[in-house]
């Protein structure tokens, strides 16, 4: 009887020991699992951080690279467009301005010419560029230009030297006399109007007088003084 009780007690004790051993093993598993989970968690967090760090530069770089060509292209396109339009506009504006100046100068030259202000007309005509005139305006331009040239030639012809011999001849014809003396003794002079003239004395026997005259290059003869040839 006692022996049976001992066996039973031993069996119960063995069962309890096995049960405690099993419980002890489960506790270790539970305690170990969080540790492994924690290690895996740490590893996961660390890997996530590393991946995020690796991903951020990779993501930022393409954005910066993609934006740069787009801006550069837009800027170049805009610059080219502005530059092209600016050049065209500037060229047209310059042409229009030069054309307006030439046509206005031609109009002024015509007005001066018709008013007999030939020097002013010639000056205005110098400001005209024939390339900017119409066919009708070109006819006016050449008409004024030729007229001014012909007038200048006529003036130059009239301004040729007026000789003493010519002055003496004009005086003899006017007074019907013969003038003796050396023409080289006469000196040409010029009045305020640009006319040349010679001063000389002419004895008019029929009128009993001696006159001092100025004989001008345009044919005018002016008497400046007179005196009788003989008294009584």
Image (spheres, rainbow, N blue to C red):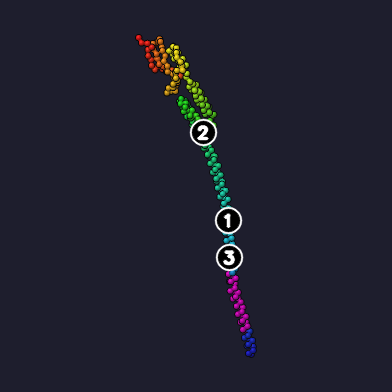
Figure label count: 3
Q: Is residue 90 above or below residue 198?
A: below
Q: Find the magenta span and give its range.
A: 12-38
Q: Quadrant of residue 222?
A: top left
Identify the residue shown where x is 52% and y is 27%.
142
Image coordinates of residue 69 in percent, x first then y, are 58, 50
The relative height of residue 2 versus residue 232 in the rendered view (above or below) is: below
Left or right: 203 in relation to 99 = left
Q: Is residue 191 visible?
A: yes
On residue 99, the disc is: 2
In this picture, is 43 found above or below 18?
Answer: above
Residue that carries the numbered disc 3 in the rendered image? 46
Can you give x and y, in whole percent of width and height, for residue 16 in the image? 61, 82
For the residues marked 2 and 3, what is the alpha-carbon distance in whole angstroms? 80 Å
Q: 10 Å neighbourhood of mark 1: few (<14), some, or many (≥20)?
A: few
What residue lies at 55% left-to-right and 42% top-to-bottom? 84
* Vertical comparison of 74 with 19: above or below: above
User: x, y percentage for residue 197?
Assistant: 44, 19
State the residue position of label 1.
Answer: 61
Residue 35 magenta: yes
Q: Earlier in the sequence, mark 2 or mark 1?
A: 1
């Amino acid at each position: 009887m006692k022996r049976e009780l001992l066996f039973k007690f031993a069996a119960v004790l063995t069962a309890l020991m096995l049960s405690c051993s099993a419980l002890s093993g489960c506790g270790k598993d539970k305690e170990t699992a969080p540790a492994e989970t924690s290690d895996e968690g740490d590893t996961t967090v660390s890997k996530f951080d590393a991946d995020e760090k690796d991903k951020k530069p990779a993501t930022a770089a393409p954005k910066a690279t993609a934006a740069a060509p787009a801006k550069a292209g837009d800027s170049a396109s805009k610059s080219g467009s502005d530059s092209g339009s600016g050049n065209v506009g500037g060229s047209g504006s310059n042409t229009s301005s030069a054309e307006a100046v030439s046509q206005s100068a031609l109009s002024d030259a015509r007005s001066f010419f018709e008013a007999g202000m030939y020097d002013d007309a010639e000056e205005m005509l110098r400001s005209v560029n024939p390339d900017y005139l119409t066919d009708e305006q070109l006819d006016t331009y050449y008409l004024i230009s030729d007229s001014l040239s012909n007038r200048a030639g006529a003036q130059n012809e009239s301004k040729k030297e007026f000789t003493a011999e010519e002055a003496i001849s004009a005086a003899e014809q006017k007074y019907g006399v013969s003038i003796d003396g050396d023409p080289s003794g006469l000196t040409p002079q010029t009045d305020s109007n640009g006319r040349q003239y010679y001063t000389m004395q002419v004895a008019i026997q029929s009128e009993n007088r001696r006159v001092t005259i100025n004989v001008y290059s345009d044919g005018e003869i002016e008497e400046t003084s007179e005196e009788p040839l003989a008294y009584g």
